[in-house]
Image (cartoon, rainbow, N blue to C red):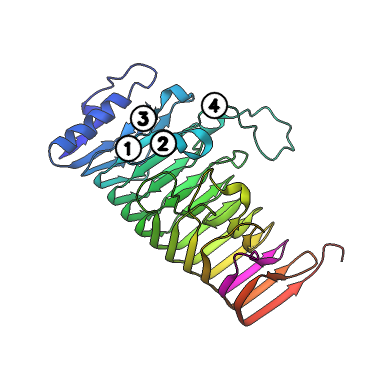
Amino acid sequence: MISNIKDLGAVGDGKNKDSAAIQQAINKCNENGGGKVIVPPGEYSISTLHMKSNVELHLMAGSKLQGGSAPDDYDSFKATGFKSELCPEKTAKVLISASYCENISITGPGEINGAGPAFYKTDIPENSRFYEKPLLQRPRMVMFFRCKNVKFEDSSYIDSPCWTLWLIACEYVNIHRIKVIGDQKMINNDGIDIDSCRHVAISDCFIKTGDDCFILRAIQHLQDEPAICEDVVMSNCTLDSICQGIRVGCPGDNIIRNCAFSNISFSGEGTGINVDNPKRYMPENSKTTMDLENITFSNFTIKSGRFPIRIYVEEGVKLRKIAGLSFSNFRIKSSEPCILTGSSETIIQDIRLSNIDMETGGDTAVVCRNCRGVKMNNVELTNVSSGE
């Protein structure tokens, strides 16, 4: 069935008056076996929406779903098997929620706006890099848990107060032609977080954020089932971040494997690709350490204010594995060197760099420590220190 929310009228509570009409349309489509909920042009004030199986939420050109500016406007995410009380940033608040759903999608050229700056202290000196983060629960824009056949297409996701899209333990996910734009003075406003998911395809997206544009994770302590992230591909995307373009893993994660990134342009103050494993990222009482292997990066253009590629394991961190990472066909200009640094307990293995044209600042072009099997082919380096 096709349901236009204008046919239902605004029947909400006043402050977020359009939520009830949209939720009613979602529920009705689900109850009738599935269909499309159409959001016509106009601005709609919403609180938390709960997606249901076999429903497409379609945002027409000129439509805008506007999230509230206070934590009370949002529900906390709850799902069987998910430990929401342990969520990073001490918040499980969410604008669009789904768990154990199938065949769900958000499509169309409209906009979803999270009112992000309203959750920060923005009255800071002009030269300050970030807004001050207050002690309140900042909502994420989208949280989906254990969903199958998920699609995001064409829509714009603007100013999420916390992570924008967080997909956990989902399968068969397609994300195409979306825009994720966040005020770059906000912190923790990640673009897309793919966590413990399988069979994910992401393409033709534009992501500009104050924090990580894209994250690949397998966060174990939030769920009882083994956290495994695999078969994720990302292509033809443009990234811009003060923090980093692509982040892969954290020391408390479980298994991340068999993923590929290609045809990516990163330009920003942050690091291009970061595999960072410091002690401070270990969750309390974690018994799991990361197993990361077979990740490929090809056809990248990186213009970075920091490190173009950084693989780092802090001394004292013992991971199960970092192995089989390859970087090919890169054009790089960066302020800092390429970093390949393991720890005495975690030797980085089988790293390949081929067809790399890299110009770096600082005193060195490449730092390599506690590594085994680093192979370089057709790597051209230019290094000019800042003092010259």
Q: Residue at x 46, y 63 (%)?
A: 236
From the image, tell me which residue sits under label 3.
48
CB-based contact (under 8 Å), mark 3 and mark 1: no
Instruction: Single out the residue that lies furthest toward the left.
Output: 32
Q: Dot 4, how many residues are within 10 Å of its Cα: few (below 14), some (14-19), or many (20+)? A: few
Which kind of residue does numbered mark 1 sit on?
Ala
| First along the sequence among labels 4 and 1 | 1
Q: Position of residue 346 (x, y in %)?
A: 59, 65
Q: Is residue 308 above or below residue 221?
A: below
Left or right of residue 385, residue 88 in this image: left
| First along the sequence among labels 2 and 4 | 2
Is residue 253 at least partly visible in the picture? Answer: yes
From the image, tell me which residue sits under label 4.
136
Q: Position of residue 13 (x, y in %)?
A: 33, 16
CA distance for labels 4 and 1: 22 Å
CA distance for labels 2 and 1: 8 Å
Q: Which mark is residue 79?
A: 1
In what quadrant of the picture does the C terminus appear?
bottom right
Left or right of residue 295, residue 105 in this image: left
From the image, tell me which residue sits under label 2.
84
Q: Position of residue 340 (x, y in %)?
A: 64, 68
CB-based contact (under 8 Å), mark 2 and mark 1: yes
Is residue 242 at least partly visible in the picture? Answer: no
- Secondary structure, mark 3, is loop
Which kind of residue does numbered mark 3 sit on?
Thr
